[in-house]
Structures are given as C-alpha cells and as structure tokens.
Image: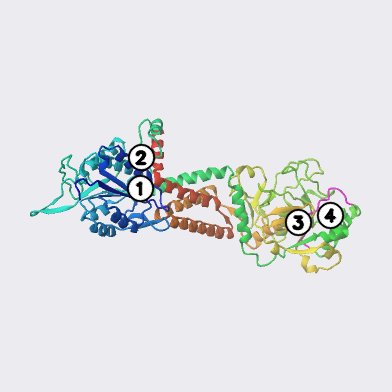
Amino acid sequence: MSANSPTKILFLSTDPRDVLRLRVGQELRDIREQLKLANLREEFILEDRTATRPRDISQAILDFKPHIVHFSGHGTETGNLCFEDELGKVKPVTPKALTALFKLVAHQVNCVVLNACYSDIQAEAIVEHISCVIGMNKAIGDRAAIIFAVGLYKALVAGEPVDRAFEFGLVDLQLEDIPEELTPVIRKKKTNLGSEEKEEKAIAVIPNQDLTPPISIEVEEENSFFEKEQQESSDRSSNDNLSQEEEEEMFGTRLPPNPPINDRPTWMKKVGGVLLASLLGTGLIVVVRQLGWLEILELKAYDFFLRSRPEEVAEDLRIVVVEANAEDLKKYGFPLPDRVLAQVLQKVEAMEPQSIGLDIYRDIPIEPGNKELLAQLKSERVTAVCQVPFEGNAGGVAPPPGVSEDRQGFSNVVYDIDGVIRRQLLAIDVEPTLSFRCTANYSLSFYLALYYLQQKGIEPKDTYPVQLDRTVFNGLDIASGGYFQEHLKKRGYQILLNYRSPQKLARRVTVSDVLDARIKPDWIKERIVLIGVTDPSKPDIHPTPYGKMPGVLVQAQMTSQIISAVLDRRVLLQPRSPYVEVLWIWGWSLVGGAGVLVWKKRLDRVAAISVSIAVLALISYIWFVNGIWIPLIPAAIVLIITARIVLIDQASNNLYVLFAILKKFS
C-alpha cells in the first residue's frame, strides 16, 4: 500500500421495514460532515451502501477495498446482525458467517465498527482475524449510537489512533448526558510475542499516519476501559422524543434518553412495561365505555351473536298468535271493526284458551259492533292492551272502556340508541291519573306469563329481583353491559330480551282462519293467545335484531321468554358485574402486551394479535350462547391498544418518561 494512500471507510447500513426504523441516514450524514470539516479530509474516502443484503457485504469489500468497515443497523440478543432480504425484511447474519468473511479480507481491513445492539458477540469472533473491532455489549439507543459514531470518526480524521478515538466517542456520550458510555466495547487482536501472549498496541488505521505516535493501551479480554454490564434491554431504538429544551421545561433538569442502568433483570422490566401498558389501556377503554362511545359497536356485536346462535328446536306451542295480515285487513278493513274483534274473541274463547291478550288499541269505538266487543272484553280470560305515559308519550293510550285495572297490560317498549328493541320492560311504577288513562303496572307480556304460570301453581316471590320458582330475573342497572348509563336510568324494570328465531317463535293463524273455522281446537286449548296486526304497512312495526317485527310478535317473544325461562330453564341473557367486566377487559389487554413480547417479527405479531382476537370472539360467543353477555368490542380494542403501547415503549422508552413525570409531580 502506498504511503500516501487515503484511508477508505465503507459504511454499510440496513433498516428493514418489518422492525422499528432507525436513523441510519442521519448517522451517515453526520459522519460525512465530520470528514468534510477535518484538516485531514483529503486522507479519507467514505463510501456507503444502504439497504445492504448479506451478499452485498463481500461485493462492497471487494469493490472498494476498505480499511475500515462500519455497520449501522439492528442487532439481536443472540449476536446476529440484521441485514435485508429481497423484500426489505430482516435477514439475520450470524457471527460465524461474518467471521469467515473477515478472515478472507484480513489483509485489507484494519478495523471493523459494529454500531448495533449486542454486536460485541460478533466483535469477539471477528477480532480473531481483524486488528481492531468495536461492538456493543448490550442494546444501545439510536441517539447514543449516532453520537458515539460521530465522536469516534471526529477523532480518527483528526489523526488520533483507534484507542483514543474510541475514548473520544465515549466522552461525547457523557458530554451529551447519555448514560450509555458502558455500552461500546473495543477489542484488539491478540498476538504472541515471545513466550507471552499479548494484545496489539494502539492501532493506527491511517496508512500514512505518522503525525501522532501510537499510544499503548492494554485491553483486557473483558475490556479494561469499563466493566461490562450484564443488563439487557430492547432492540436499538430512537430515544430522543423530547428535545433538551422540552425536557428542561418539563422537569427542570435534562432527562437521559434511556432509563438509568439498574440491576433488574430484563424480564422484570418487560413484564413491568406490559403491566403498566395494560393498566393505561384498560383505564382508557373503561372511561371511553362509560361515556357511551362504544355503545353502538357493542350493541351491533350483541345483534350478531344473537342471530348467529343455533335456532330453537321447535316453536313455543304454548303461545298462539292470531294475526290480522294484509289479506285480512283488505277483507275486513283497517282498523278492524269492533264486531270482527268480538267475533274473533268469541270463537277463540270457545276453544278454552288459558288467556287471551288483545294487542290492538280500543280506546275509541270502531263501529259497528262496539257493544258486542265490550261484552267479550268482560271475560276473565281477556287482557286488554293500553299504553302508559312513558318514553315521550305524555298522554298514553287508554284501555277499552269497562276493562278493570287487573286485566290491563301496557304495550310500552324501550328502544336502544339505534332504535332497536333489545330489552323487555316488565313493570313500571305508574302514578294514578284520570280514570280513563292506562294505569297498568305490568306489561302485557309479563301479565300473560304470570297468569299462565299461576295456573300451574307458580307464584312470584315477594323479593327483589323478581323471582318465579327458581328463575331470577335480574333487572338491568345503570352500569349493565354495553349500555351508556343515561340510557338505563328511570326506565322501569328491564331485562335483556332473549329472542327466539322468528321462524321458531309460535304457532300463527290468521283472523280469517279463526272466523272461517280452519283451525283445530287443540291448537288453542290451554294456550296463551295473542291477537294483533302483522301487516308490515301498518304502524305497529318495530326494529329488532332480526329486522322489523310486528308488535304482536314482539309481545309473543317477550311472553315466551318468561315462560320458557321458568318452565324450560331456557337461558336469560345477562351481563356480568362491572367489576368482572373490567377484569375481563384488563385480562385481554395483558394478552395483547404479552403477544408483543413473545413475538419479535411484525408479521408474527400481527398474526398473534389476529388469533387472539379470534379466540376472544369465540370465547365471547360461547358465553353468549350460555346466557352471559361479556364485552367483546372493548376487549378487542384494548388488546390492540396495549400491544401498540408496548411496541412504542420498546421503541422509545416512553413509559420511562411517564415514570419520570409521575415522580416529578408526585
């Protein structure tokens, strides 16, 4: 090599797209600036290769023939350096492979700088063939790595030997108040001098360097400059989220970009980070949920689960619906005349039903036949419908004249925020008003079910919540399920409505079938009969999770739910207590945080989170089928949020900054 040959520096960098991004471009720019400002700038040539693939390393060395090889990028705890594959993703290179390469170019390369996490493992192997190798004995922050590299080359291009240039890099870290001066490690090749094995003295990497005499610095195998720390941390990451001015303004003194070195094992810090992230995520979701911002999403998930359940094996044959469909209304007119209703009631009662619920308002006569209808309504089997002043209906709808209070049932329903009926109103405390107004305390469906069960010897217990036989009907309180608190206040005694599939609800016959004697008496005997209009073009149509449903069928759903729960032990849908729901949400937030720790690659993490959400949905569905409504949407969201918080913390130690803020203001 000519005495005047310039020193060649080969800068290799990688920044795979499937790991946290680094500022390798800034590192290259800063080193290049130092070369331009140096007095000896003519004696150095800097060549760079970005997005380096493993096969590009040897090609670049053969083409450029460098004296110094500098690598900037990611390293793993096992000592692999992260290069890139054809798709720009991580391609690890082992210490064994790089050592074999540098063995072939040892006659050319004098120094190797591995500016990556855990690269001292590589350095220890490569130094068997290369005079001087610099690596990192643990993870190093992105900012610290850049400052160290710039300090190193600043001294080299000023004519300092590698040993002193290394020290300059460490001093620059201390000057910037970055407590990572124990991370870089310098290793020098051992040589046999006489009978004693000694390490090479300070190395000058400039071929014509005679400006500064080499300074002898003995380096122990474990690095006599600094005692090697045993602490491990996350991958090399960006830690300069706050500028010096911002940190001083916030805390009064400058915060180091990295947490202070301590003796806690890595797993303790990682677990602690997951716990803190899960608490933050859970707290956020609980607050958002209490504000009602997730209510509509939770209700839509509720509807999906409801429709996805297996259908009932058979119809509830204890209930018969006598419906006035479009053909009946075309034939008899709308509203149905009182005489037609009277004839229907007469024929149905002759078949000895247990009770009859008339789900058609008759607060005003519809002649002809009003007297005939009033006569039929005096039967003990008949319960007439009315509407109490509730849900914006200030006046309500009165029952038919002459119907006693103990044979009235209100038809009021409660709508959710999207206008869908998902709840059943059992009772309302009604203040007595004018005698012609509805004063019913029980809903029509609840009244019919109670009467039916009483005929079988089952009386309601004088307890709260409502209990019939062994079945307890727990009312919804202001913190139930996915409902916003304001939507459950002062709304009477409510339970969730566990719909049957509309195809498996009850036997249905038309008004014409009854009047023309086309039904069998056995269909009616000892059954509950509900009479109402099912023409979809008429007003009494309501949105449900199964689509629009006539009011009389909604009443049939509600009546069937109560009877089936008591006699068949059919499940009632119930949310868990708020405390159980919070624990459930927190548990899934821990799953999200743990997934980030266990899986390192981006695609693996995405797959793990996707599988976790699928498992969450499956568990939630199984519970739902068994009558328990647990939060799906909040748990899925908090799982993703916590995973993201942990990922960000690994990248920038933001939780350390949060700890510092809490400590400052506590």
- The amino acid type of the residue labelled 4 equals Leu
Judging by the rendered image, the residue that carries numbered circle 1 is 236
- The amino acid type of the residue labelled 3 equals Val
Mark 3 residue crowding within 10 angstroms, few (<14) / some (14–19) / many (20+): many
Q: Is residue 295 visible?
A: yes
Residue 218 % position (x, y): 15, 46
Q: Residue, x 69% and y 56% (percent of image)?
A: 547
Say which element carries label 3. helix
Q: Quadrant of residue 535?
A: bottom right
Say which element carries label 2. loop
Dots 1, 3 in contact, CB < 8 A: no
Q: Residue, x 79% and y 61% (percent of image)?
A: 322
In this view, the mark in front (4 or 1): 1
- First reached walking from the N terminus: tag 3 or tag 4: 4
- The amino acid type of the residue labelled 1 equals Arg
| Left or right: residue 553 compared with residue 9 | right
| Left or right: residue 90 compared with residue 364 | left
- First reached walking from the N terminus: tag 4 or tag 2: 2
Report, in whole angstroms, how far the alpha carbon at label 3 lies from the one at label 4.
Answer: 18 Å
Judging by the rendered image, the residue that carries numbered circle 3 is 552
Residue 571 % position (x, y): 61, 59
Q: Nearer the viewer, residue 323 or 536?
A: 536
Report, in whole angstroms, how far the alpha carbon at label 4 lies from the one at label 2.
Answer: 83 Å
Per the rendered image, the range of residues in magenta is 353-366
Dots 4, 1 in contact, CB < 8 A: no
- The amino acid type of the residue labelled 2 equals Pro
Residue 377: which disc? 4
Using the image, determine if residue 271 lies above or below residue 306. above
In this view, the mark in front (3 or 2): 2
